Image (tube, grey):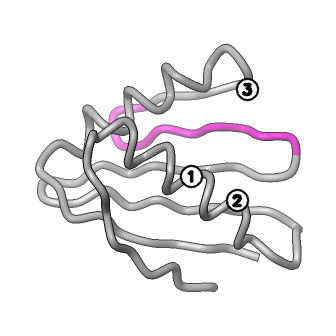
Amino acid sequence: MKSQTSLITSDSKRIAKRLVNHWKHKFEVAESETEFRIFMPTATVILTPLAESLTAEIDSNLDDHSHLENVVLDHLNRMAQQEFEVVWSHI
């Protein structure tokens, strides 16, 4: 199952970088020019910074991502120091 959302922000790369740095002590992470990946035990979180938005995707074999979606959004809010209102789409 995959979940995806987009956060409207011009600070997308900074927010993604802060979250990767925050979680790198706990999970394996990977960075490239176009995306950041966080490898959790049951899921991979992929952050793709764009000019005016940050795409967050959760990819796993879990049937329900709702808890993980809340955890990722809560951490993105903390890294951005603002509250994003998002809707997750399930692919």
Q: Which residues are magenta?
A: 32-41
Q: Which residue is mark 3?
A: 27
Is 24 magenta? The answer is no
> Residue 58, position in %: x, y?
64, 61
For residue 20, side relative to residue 77 (left or right): right
Mark 1 Cα-neighbour bin, 10 Å: few <14, some 14–19, many ≥20: some
Q: Quadrant of residue 29?
A: top right
Instruction: Give the residue at x 73% y 64%.
Output: 67
What amino acid is found at the position of numbered circle 3 in the picture? Phe
Q: Quadrant of the C terminus?
A: bottom right
- Residue 35's x, y, as percent? 42, 43
Q: Is 36 covered by the magenta stretch? A: yes
Residue 28 x %, y %: 71, 25
Q: Earlier in the sequence, mark 2 or mark 3?
A: 3
Mark nearer the viewer, 1 or 3: 1
Q: Pointer 1: what residue?
A: 72
Any mark on residue 50, and which? none
Marks 1/3 in contact by CB < 8 Å: the verdict is no
Figure check: 4 above or below 55? below
- Do the residues bearing badges 1 and 2 touch, measured as CB atoms within 8 Å? yes
The CA span between labels 2 and 3 is 14 Å
Near-viewer residue (30 or 9): 9
Q: How far apart in space, not on screen, are marks 1 and 2 (Cα)?
A: 6 Å
Q: Earlier in the sequence, mark 1 or mark 3?
A: 3
The amino acid at mark 1 is Val
Element at badge 3? loop
Q: Which mark is residue 68?
A: 2
Q: Position of residue 3 (x, y in %)?
A: 61, 74
* Crowding at mark 2 (Cα within 10 Å: few <14, some 14-19, many 20+): some
